[in-house]
Image (spheres, rainbow, N blue to C red):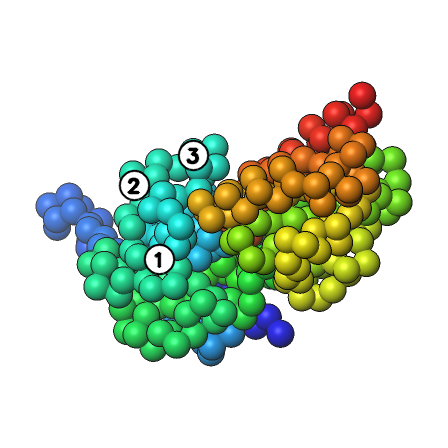
């Protein structure tokens, strides 16, 4: 269960030095007052692996997964360092839409293998990650800088946003992002009339041997649920995804099918399957209701920016389905 944060950031306490006033005449010398600088207040952030003390407002943040990258940017924080995926040395293209310059975010290895030396060289004042990816190196990360770990990834993106907001001292901003998302999801759902009567199928091609059908226990599953969509029976699962072989692609059936590909192998697999006869037997494909979507936005973002981009895409698809 996602750790909660007990302590909220309070106002900085003023620490002032008081000096005795001199006598009233100018000849006695001018009265002077000195004030010692206020000490930066620290707060205790409780997370999946314990408690971490964070002092002041972190300015040099390193993020070690795509969800943490998305969340930091959504809160207006451009990390000084971030990991890359296993299939690309580039950060997701959509982050430029958030006003971030990828050149400002140093490469600190991959999600699977963060480079601890590169992280330390950046002298971060906060590291954000999750136990799914990096529980094994938590102690090493904590030796570099205060480290806050979310308990899970994917469908817990909203809880992770609140945790990151606490760590960054931006709790109110994080909560407002969730309010905005809920309102926007309801608006998009209304474009589909009764979204609960529409089964949306999510298909992701990652390699030639296995195709992922994403379930309710995933980031995209959570966003679709917020909109109010139903899911095909095979995808009504708390698991992140169910794998099927190319010969089982008909299980991807739904009233609407959205599909993407991850990396070069995924793109090759997608081309082969979507160009094959079995794909053409899916009713949604036959009816022109199968759409390719951007993998970075729908599957890698895992945060408020990605959720917003998915909602934008769903709004455009709604207009297309009506015509």
Regarding residue 5, the answer to whether it shows in the image is: no
Q: Residue at x 44, y 57 (%)?
A: 65
- Indicate the secondary structure of the residue bearing disc 1: strand
Q: Which of 205 and 81 is in front in this view?
A: 205
From the top left corner, tell me how far across and down residue 211 is, in percent: 61, 55
User: Which tag, 3 or 2, sits closer to the chain's start?
Assistant: 3
Q: Where is residue 144 in the image (x, y as percent from the top left)?
A: 27, 68
Badge 1 local density, few (<14 within 10 Å), some, or many (20+)?
A: some
> Is there a contact, CB below 8 Å, between mark 1 and mark 2?
no
| Residue sitting at x 47%, y 77% | 49
Would you place residue 298 above or below residue 47 in this image?
above
Q: In this view, does 225 lie to the left or right of 302?
A: right
| Picture quadrant of residue 310 | top right
Q: Which of marks 1 and 2 is in front?
A: 1
Task: Name the mark on residue 96.
Answer: 3
The earlier-in-sequence mark between 1 and 2 is: 2
Q: Quadrant of the N terminus?
A: bottom right
In space, the residues marked 1 and 3 are separated at their CA atoms by 20 Å
Which residue occupies 43% across, 34% down? 96
In terms of depth relative to the viewer, which is nearer, 37 or 3? 3
């Amino acid at each position: 269960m996602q750790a909660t944060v007990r302590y909220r950031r309070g106002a900085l306490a003023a620490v002032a030095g008081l000096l005795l006033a001199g006598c009233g005449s100018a000849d006695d010398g001018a009265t002077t007052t000195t004030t010692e600088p206020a000490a930066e207040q620290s707060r205790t952030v409780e997370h999946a692996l314990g408690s971490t003390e964070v002092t002041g407002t972190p300015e040099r943040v390193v993020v070690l997964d795509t969800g943490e990258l998305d969340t930091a940017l959504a809160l207006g924080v451009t990390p000084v360092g971030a990991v890359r995926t296993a299939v690309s040395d580039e950060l997701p293209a959509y982050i430029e839409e958030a006003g971030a310059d990828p050149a400002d975010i140093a490469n600190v290895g991959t999600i699977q293998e963060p480079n601890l030396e590169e992280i330390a060289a950046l002298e971060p004042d906060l590291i954000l990650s999750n136990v799914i990816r990096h529980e094994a190196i938590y102690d090493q990360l904590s030796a570099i800088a205060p480290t806050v770990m979310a308990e899970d990834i994917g469908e817990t993106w909203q809880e992770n946003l609140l945790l990151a907001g606490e760590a960054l001292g931006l709790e109110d901003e994080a909560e407002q992002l969730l309010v905005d998302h809920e309102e926007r999801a309801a608006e998009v759902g209304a474009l589909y009339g009764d979204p609960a009567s529409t089964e949306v199928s999510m298909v992701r091609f990652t390699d030639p041997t296995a195709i992922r059908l994403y379930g309710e226990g995933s980031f995209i599953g959570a966003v679709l649920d917020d909109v109010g969509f139903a899911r095909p029976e095979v995808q009504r699962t708390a698991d992140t995804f169910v794998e099927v072989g190319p010969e089982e692609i008909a299980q991807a059936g739904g009233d609407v099918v959205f599909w993407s590909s991850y990396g070069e192998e995924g793109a090759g697999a997608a081309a082969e399957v979507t160009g094959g006869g079995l794909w053409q037997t899916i009713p949604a494909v036959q009816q022109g209701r199968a759409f390719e979507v951007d993998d970075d936005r729908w599957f890698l973002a895992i945060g408020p920016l990605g959720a917003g981009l998915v909602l934008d895409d769903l709004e455009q698809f709604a207009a297309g389905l009506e015509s």
